[in-house]
Amino acid sequence: MKCNVYCTSVKHFAAFNAVYARYFPLDPPARIFVCTPEWFGPFDVEIDCTAMI
């Protein structure tokens, strides 16, 4: 499993890490954290996740 995380600011990195750790406390999936310019919509974080069963 791999997660691509797109965020509007690095200031959200610590908060995102805290939430990510709650959902994946052991052996978290690989991920990237990319800062992007602001986009339309009421959110600051978008996650694209690929998993295989």
Image (cartoon, helix red, strand yellow):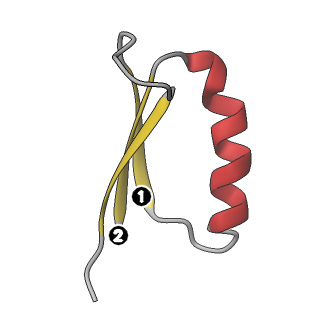
For label 1, the residue is 30
Circle 2 sits in a helix, a strand or a loop, which is it?
A: loop
Q: Residue at x 70, y 69 (%)?
A: 25
Q: Is residue 47 left or right of residue 42?
A: left
Q: Is residue 37 left or right of residue 26?
A: left
Circle 1 sits in a helix, a strand or a loop, which is it?
A: strand
Q: Residue at x 62, y 29 (%)?
A: 13
Q: Residue at x 69, y 58 (%)?
A: 21
**In which image quadrant can residue 14 be found?**
top right
28 vs 4: above or below: below
43 vs 26: above or below: above
- Residue 22 location in percent, x, y? 73, 62
Location of the N terminus (image quadrant): bottom left
Q: Are marks 1 and 2 in contact (CB under 8 Å)?
A: yes
Disc 1 crowd rating (10 Å Cα; few below 14, some 14-19, many 20+) is few
* Closer-to-camera residue (38/50): 38
19 vs 38: above or below: below
- Residue 42 location in percent, x, y? 49, 25
Q: Residue at x 48, y 34 (%)?
A: 45
Q: Amino acid at mark 1?
A: Ala
Q: Amino acid at mark 2?
A: Met
Q: Mark 2 or mark 1, which is nearer the start of the sequence? A: 2
* Closer-to-camera residue (4/38): 38
For label 2, the residue is 1
- How far apart in space, not on screen, are marks 1 and 2 (Cα)? 7 Å
23 vs 7: above or below: below
- Residue 32 location in percent, x, y? 39, 41
Disc 2 crowd rating (10 Å Cα; few below 14, some 14-19, many 20+) is few
**In which image quadrant can residue 10 be found?**
top right
Badge count: 2
